[in-house]
Amino acid sequence: MNTKLPETIETATFGLGCFWSPDAQFGIIKGVVRTRVGYAGGTTANPTYHNIGNHIEAVEIDFDRSQISYAELLEIFWRSHNPRQSPSWSRQYMDAVFYRTESQKQGVEQKLDREKANGGEIYTLIQPLTQFYWAEDYHQKYYLRQEPELMKEFDRTQFVNSTVAARINGYVAGFGSFSNLKGEIRDFGLSAAGCEKLEKIVSRIRH
Ligand code: MHO
């Protein structure tokens, strides 16, 4: 699942509150090849979870343009937060889009104009990406990490960049349906015990 030519891969960066959840939400989308969580949008040096400075929790999404567009991801981003909610109590959890190219900027502005047409002030932060700092390992694909039986299935050195790990993290967090899982679980390369465990988790949270 990781064999696409690099030139069809593009990266989107969003802040949507605690980064655990958008990591899972976007990780399960078809056409997303990798995700990672980290800190962006601030100026303080070398942010970490316990010393985040003025940075924002963000997720980076590598996606395959031949399968999904930046505009489609932006659409999900706008539907996943309330842009009219006054700034959150903490900068760390701001809703934000960090564009990295002129074309992404234009895409963001198009959607922003549409939002503005509905009236009211928009609080979503819109900035060019300057730097993205990876978060600590224990934050990457957080929900999947809470399942030791499933973690046994992965080579730790490949885990963060794995498309399968990104998808399974989405299922474990409740973003996929049981019937969708049934349709693709065989492609994940899990052991029989791993399949059984994942099906059990997903059947508990989604029907
Ligand atoms: N510990 C917080 C948020 C974590 S997120 C990485 C909670 O779950 O309430 O900021």
Image: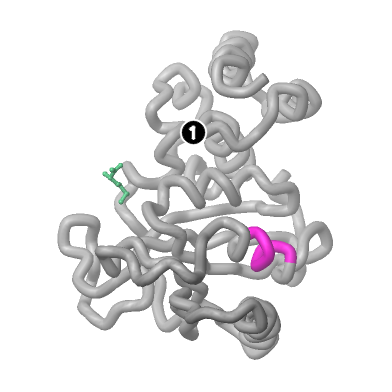
Residue 27 image point, x, y percent: 59, 47
Q: Residue furthest right?
A: 66
Residue 160 image point, x, y percent: 48, 46
Residue at 76% in and 66% down: 69
Name the one closer to the observer, 109 or 198.
Answer: 109
Name the one closer to the observer, 71 or 164.
Answer: 71
Magenta run includes residue 144: no
Number of numbered tags placed on the structure image: 1
Residue at 47% in and 55% down: 36
Magenta run includes residue 73: yes
> Quick one: quadrant of the N terminus?
top right
Q: Which residues are magenta?
A: 72-76
Please say which color scheme the image uses.
one colour
Q: Which residue is mark 1?
A: 155
Helix, strand or loop for the magenta stretch, by majority: helix
Q: Label 1: few (<14), some or many (≥20) within 10 Å?
A: few
Residue at 54% in and 53% down: 35
In the rendered view, does 165 fall on the left or right side of 3? left
Q: Is residue 81 visible?
A: yes
Placement of 164 over or under 147, stated as above or below? below
Placement of 11 over or under 27, stated as above or below? below
Residue 18 image point, x, y percent: 37, 52
Q: Quadrant of residue 183?
A: top right
In the rendered view, does 184 fall on the left or right side of 140? right
**Mark 1: secondary structure:** loop
Instruction: Name the amino acid type tagged 1.
Output: Asp
Placement of 17 over or under 192, stated as above or below? below
Q: Residue furthest bottom?
A: 102
Residue 98 image point, x, y percent: 50, 76
